[in-house]
Each structure stands twice: as C-alpha cells, then as structure tokens.
Image (cartoon, grey):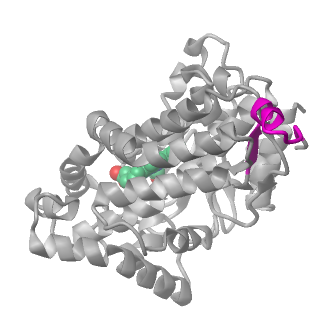
C-alpha cells in the first residue's frame, strides 16, 4: 500500500473503526447487498446514480433517511428533509446564494485576511495547523454567506453537533436534539432578527424577499453551517496530505489532482435514502420502507487508485458522484470549489511544505484529520528552524 493510501485508511478507520471494515466486506459480496440492521448497501456508481436520480422511489424523507435525523433540529422545511416540487421551489430560491460569482466574491472578501496570515506565518518558518485554518475560514465564509454578525458565535460547538452523530443512527437521541437545537438557536438568533427586520442588505432579509418563511430561513442557516464546514475541514487537509504523500507538494495541486482527491477521499462517505415502495436495485429486491445506503466511497473507489495523470475520460462516468446526484446534488459545490482553490492558491508559494505529527480524528461523522501541522522547510531554514518531516 502506498503512503497516501496508508494515511487515507487511517483517517477513515479512525472515524469509523467498524463501519468502514463492514462496508468493505459487504461490497466484496456484490454491488447491492442487504445488511441486517443497516439496510441495502449499494457500492456501484451506476446503480447509485439510478437510486439518487429516482427521488420518487428513493426519498430522503422516509424511515432511516436524513429527514428523521434532522427534522427535529432544523425543522421540516429544509432542503434535506423535502422532496418533489417543494424541494425544487426552495432550492431555486436559495440558488442565488451559491452562484460562482457570488461565492467567489464572498471567499475573496472573507478568506484573504486569514490566508494572508497563514502565508506570513509559513514564510516566517512557523508551524501552521491546516485543519484549524480551514475550519476557521469555512466557518467565517458561512457566517458571511448567511449574514450572521462576526465574533462571539461558537462554530466549533456546531461542528461538535455534527461529529456527535454516528453513521448508522437513524434518529438523534433526546440529548443530541436538545444540544443541537440550543446551538443552532444561538447561531441563528441574529439571522432571525435580520429576517424579521426584513433588511434586504442582509442575507436573511434577502431570503425573506425571496419568499422563504421564517422557519425556512432559520433552517437554511442551520443547514449551511452543518454542511459547509466539516466537509471542507475533511477534504482540504486530506488533499494537501495526498499531494505531500505523492511527492507533489502544494505547487503540484492542479484541477485534475483536486478532482482525483475528491474521488478517492469522497468526504461524504455515505448517502441515505428510504424506499418509498417495493422495487429492485440491480436485481436485488428492496421492500417499501427499507433503508438504502449509497456507499459513495466504494462507488468512486472502484475506479482505481489516485491517478491524476490518467485520461479524465476514464472517470467521467462518475459525474462527480462525490457531490451526489439528482435533485439533492450538493448545492454548495461552487462554494466548496472556491474555498479549495483559495487555500491551494495560498499554499502554492510553499512548494516544500513538510507535515509533522499529523493526527486523524477519532469517532467523527465525516472522516478528517484532527490536526495537520505544516511548515515550509526552506522558510524554516532561513528563519533558523529545524526542517521536520516526521509524518
Ligand atoms: C468537499 C466539500 C463537499 C462535499 C464532498 C459535499 C458533498 C455533498 C453531497 C454528497 C451531497 C448530497 C447528499 C445526498 O444526496 O444525500 C451534498 C448536499 C448538500 N451540500 Fe454539500 N458537499 C461539500 C461542501 C458543501 C458546502 C461548502 C456547502 C455550503 C453550504 C454544502 C451544502 C450542501 C447542501 C445545502 C446540500 C443539500 C442539497 C439538497 O438537499 O438539495 N456542501 N453535499
């Protein structure tokens, strides 16, 4: 096993020591396998797309899917708990927040300060924890995007809410719901106030103007916080580690490297659906009400190891399955890509970036590094520091 793969396995199994092994063992038995108490596990990209694009037959709102998990916290009127015409209408109204032009401008405005600070510290030979940089930056971007005032709001608490969930749980415990609600209430207080004031210069005010009711606006704020931070905290450090472990360094992170890294890491490792009626997936009968688990990582992993130099046509059929497919395809993709490019762009000036003492996060929902300390070797020497590449 190559260095990058060893680290990826460590990150994945630290997050889910049992689930990853189980899912791999299941996938070895076939592309669609029923696992008692888990559901019907799909590990083939074509069949996964069939499920995800047939939102009438496989919904996010039935038993075992996302709605049961999130409705108690976010309310029942958020993108991930709606289907059909209602979902499409809400998504259209929120779409304007995520156009490449708008997210590009937000990233530029919000990230230039923190990323400038990171560059200065690296140039001075200091160690920088990339996980921290990405978490703080992603949280700031969401804060700006949803129009929350700066300072005081504790996003790490919101992140802890996401991490406290387990992959196979279908509902939240009473305590988890209470804690999540309290955190999100505090976070969205200012957003609700802006909504009520109807000030169109703020995003919540604009959401009102776009036709969202108060519950929808509050739900949107909570959903973006939950989806827009930990995914990037997972991906960006893993991308930089992958580039390091394959001898590229940040200067070698091209668009093709980013795409391949998204494929082999698949930060959202599973997507959950509920069968609305009896049917068949790849010849396997599925009963109404059964849970369908799309094992994204296995679907994308089947296309071979990390190989950014190969012909992109070989993986074109995946059509970015790591961002989902069908009506729930990741709304935040343009924002995710803008943030990835911003961090990679800032690191590009440090081609000899060394990683020392990295640590995978244990027992979290979305596999990630807990710490990824990096240092620019040449800068370290210039500043009189000792080069360090113990990984
Ligand atoms: C590398 C980063 C990211 C990855 C890999 C990712 C992946 C995904 C995936 C796989 C889905 C579909 C889930 C399903 O169908 O069950 C999704 C949905 C979603 N994502 Fe992302 N995401 C990322 C970043 C973001 C960011 C930065 C945001 C910003 C707020 C975001 C917002 C959303 C939203 C709102 C949905 C729900 C869309 C809907 O249900 O209509 N994501 N994402």
For the C terminus, the quadrant is: top right
Residue 31 x %, y %:
67, 39
Highlighted range, magenta: 372-389
Residue 219 x %, y %:
31, 69
Vertical side of 216 occupied by 183: above or below: below
Vertical side of 160 occupied by 235: above or below: above
At 63% from the left and 64% from the top, the residue drawn is: 167
At 71% from the left and 25% from the top, the residue drawn is: 351
Q: How many marks?
A: 0
Q: Nearer the viewer, residue 352 or 306?
A: 352
Residue lying at the far top in this picture: please name it.
311
- Residue 121 image-quadrant placement: top right
At 53% from the left and 28% from the top, the residue drawn is: 318
Q: For residue 390: magenta? A: no
Residue 244 x %, y %:
76, 31
- Residue 194 image-quadrant placement: bottom left
Residue 239 x %, y %:
66, 37
Q: Is residue 56 visible?
A: no
Q: Nearer the viewer, residue 345 or 75?
A: 345
Q: Nearer the viewer, residue 265 or 336?
A: 336
At 66% from the left and 28% from the top, the residue drawn is: 250
């Amino acid at each position: 096993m190559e260095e990058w793969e060893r680290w990826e396995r460590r990150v994945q199994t630290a997050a889910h020591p049992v689930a990853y092994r189980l899912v791999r063992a299941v996938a070895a038995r076939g592309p669609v396998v029923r696992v008692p108490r888990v559901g019907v596990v799909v590990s083939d990209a074509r069949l996964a797309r069939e499920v995800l694009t047939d939102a009438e037959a496989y919904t996010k709102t039935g038993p075992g899917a996302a709605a049961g998990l999130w409705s108690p916290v976010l309310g029942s009127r958020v993108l991930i708990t709606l289907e059909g015409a209602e979902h499409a209408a809400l998504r259209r109204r929120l779409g304007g927040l995520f156009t490449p032009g708008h997210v590009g401008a937000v990233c530029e405005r919000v990230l230039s300060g923190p990323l400038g600070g990171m560059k200065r510290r690296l140039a001075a030979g200091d160690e920088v924890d990339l996980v921290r940089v990405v978490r703080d930056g992603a949280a700031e971007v969401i804060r700006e995007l949803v129009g929350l005032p700066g300072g005081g709001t504790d996003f790490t608490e919101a992140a802890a809410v996401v991490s406290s969930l387990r992959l196979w749980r279908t509902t939240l415990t009473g305590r988890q719901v209470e804690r999540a609600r309290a955190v999100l209430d505090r976070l969205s207080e200012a957003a609700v106030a802006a909504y009520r004031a109807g000030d169109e210069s703020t995003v919540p005010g604009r959401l009102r103007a776009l036709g969202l009711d108060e519950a929808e606006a509050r739900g949107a704020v909570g959903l973006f916080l939950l989806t827009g931070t930990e995914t990037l905290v997972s991906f960006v450090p893993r991308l930089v580690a992958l580039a390091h472990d394959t001898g590229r360094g940040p200067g070698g992170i091209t668009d093709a490297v980013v795409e391949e890294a998204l494929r082999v890491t698949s930060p959202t490792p599973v997507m959950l659906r509920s069968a609305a009626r009896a049917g068949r997936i790849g010849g396997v009968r599925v009963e109404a009400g059964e849970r369908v688990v799309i094992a994204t990582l296995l679907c994308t992993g089947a296309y071979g190891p990390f190989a950014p130099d190969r012909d992109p046509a070989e993986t074109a059929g995946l059509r970015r399955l790591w961002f989902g497919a069908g009506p729930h395809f990741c709304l935040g993709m343009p924002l995710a890509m803008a943030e990835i490019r911003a961090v990679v762009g800032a690191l590009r000036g440090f081609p000899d970036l060394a990683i020392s003492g990295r640590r995978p996060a244990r027992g979290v929902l979305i596999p990630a590094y807990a710490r990824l300390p990096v240092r620019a070797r040449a800068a370290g020497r210039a500043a009189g520091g000792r080069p360090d590449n113990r990984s």
